[in-house]
Image: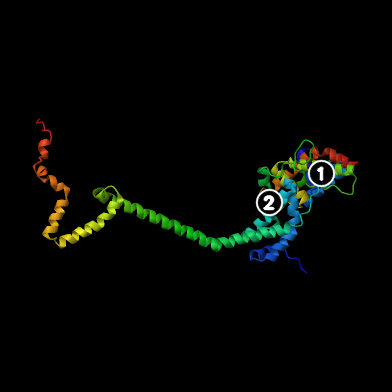
């Protein structure tokens, strides 16, 4: 018998053949000693494999499964309950932080040109607002003459007023060559 | 009292009935633990995997389709877990020169305690030889042999569990038994005496 037929004999022993095929094998076995020995070999192998035993589950197996199932239920309810609120809170918080950061960046960009006029340090920038407000108020209400004179004395730049008024900046520049 | 079918129990589990899940657990804990013991050899790992299998059944209860047999579904989950554990190299650590476990206290010894020391040794040796012969089979052949021979799952179900055709299952089993016949020949001959 070839290997294909050996497979048929194996399937016969394992009761995996259709009834008609099993009947054919049975008839063949009645007159073929060799195939009878092959079948006997598979039966003995089956008996040998029966010797492999395994232990029972430990007594605490069920309680461990129940505990794991209960823990998974809590995890799930946690996600749907407090867990979901927590996720939501984290989301809202991160949105607030992002919006805050964007506003800060926008403000810094907006303040950069005015800062360059007012001075390099930011505290000075913050002081310009009240100063400009005060000057606007001064324009509305002109100061008395005496007070105005005192203010002029305090302006150090006016000390060299004569020099500055006679200073010809253009004469200091090099003459352009005519082509 | 009528015994609830697996299907009825599983449908009740789907509706949140913990008692029905408990019934399924009691019904299948022993075959599932034994299946894992044979697949991965280490009893502690086998129990961990069996717990995981039941947990997955519970977690996936809403996805259970009533047209599929519960045992097919359960063994498919179990087989995937076992094969993943084998691929990760878990539960394969008992090989040593004398054939004893490197992690001996975790490996079961099922020799009859009433037998003599010599008989116990022979019995332990027989079990080890069978285990090693089956363990040496390719993954699918091993799963097919254990499901068919020890879990008494029919080949139609095995084909669904392993996602192969029925003829492929027959072929897997035949090739596996041919290998085992050669490897276990000394034991088969001993059995004749």
Q: Nearer the viewer, mark 1 or mark 2?
A: 1
The chain under label 2 reads B
Task: Tell which subunit mark 1 falls on.
Answer: B
Q: Crowdedness of circle 1 by 10 Å Cα count: few (<14), some, many (20+)? A: many
Name the residue: 86% across, 42% down. Answer: B121
Is residue B34 visible in the rendered image? The answer is yes
Q: Position of residue B54 (x, y in %)?
A: 68, 56
Residue B83 image position (x, y, % from top left): 67, 46
**Quarter containing the C terminus of chain A:** top left
Q: Secondary structure at mark 1?
A: helix
Q: Residue at x 73, y 49 (%)?
A: B44
Q: Which mark is residue B191?
A: none
Mark 2 lies on a secondary structure that is helix
Q: Alpha-carbon distance for marks 1 and 2? A: 27 Å
In-image side of A92 versus B19 (left or right): left
User: Dot 2: within a 10 Å radius of its alpha carbon, few (fewer than 14), some, or many (20 or more) residues?
Assistant: many
Determine whether, in the image, residue A20 is placed left or right of residue B112.
left
Q: Residue furthest bottom?
A: B1
The answer to whether mark 1 and mark 2 are in CB contact below 8 A is no
Q: Which residue is mark 2?
A: B161
Q: Which residue is mark 1?
A: B127
First in residue order: circle 1 vs circle 2 = 1
């Amino acid at each position: 018998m070839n290997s294909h037929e050996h497979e048929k004999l194996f399937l016969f022993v394992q009761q995996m053949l259709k009834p008609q095929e099993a009947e054919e094998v049975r008839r063949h076995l009645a007159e073929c000693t060799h195939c009878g020995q092959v079948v006997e070999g598979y039966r003995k192998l089956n008996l040998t494999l029966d010797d492999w035993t395994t232990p029972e589950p430990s007594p605490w197996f069920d309680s461990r499964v129940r505990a794991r199932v209960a823990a998974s239920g809590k995890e799930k309810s946690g996600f749907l309950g407090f867990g979901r609120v927590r996720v939501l809170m984290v989301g809202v918080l991160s949105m607030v932080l992002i919006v805050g950061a964007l506003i800060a960046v926008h403000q810094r960009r907006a303040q950069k040109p005015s800062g360059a006029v007012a001075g390099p340090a930011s505290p000075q920038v913050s002081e310009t607002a009240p100063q400009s407000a005060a000057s606007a108020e001064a324009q509305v209400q002109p100061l008395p003459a005496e007070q105005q004179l005192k203010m002029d004395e305090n302006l150090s730049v006016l000390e060299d007023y004569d020099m500055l008024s006679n200073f010809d900046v253009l004469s200091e520049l090099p003459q352009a060559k005519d082509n | 009292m009528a015994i609830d079918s697996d299907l009825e129990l599983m449908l009740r589990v789907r509706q949140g009935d913990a008692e029905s899940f408990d019934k399924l657990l009691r019904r299948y804990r022993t075959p599932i633990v034994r299946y894992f013991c044979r697949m991965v050899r280490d009893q502690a790992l086998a129990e961990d995997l069996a717990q995981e299998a039941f947990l997955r059944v519970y977690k996936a209860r809403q996805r259970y389709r009533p047209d599929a047999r519960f045992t097919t579904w359960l063994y498919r989950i179990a087989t995937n877990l076992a094969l993943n554990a084998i691929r990760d190299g878990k539960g394969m650590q008992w090989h040593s020169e004398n054939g004893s476990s490197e992690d001996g206290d975790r490996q079961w010894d099922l020799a009859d305690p009433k037998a003599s020391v010599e008989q116990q040794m022979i019995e332990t040796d027989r079990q080890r030889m069978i285990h090693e012969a089956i363990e040496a089979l390719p993954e699918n052949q091993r799963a097919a042999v254990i499901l068919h021979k020890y879990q008494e799952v029919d080949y139609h179900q095995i084909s669904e569990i392993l996602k192969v055709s029925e003829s492929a299952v027959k072929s897997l089993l035949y090739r596996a038994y041919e290998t085992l016949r050669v490897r276990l020949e000394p034991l088969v001959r001993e059995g004749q005496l």
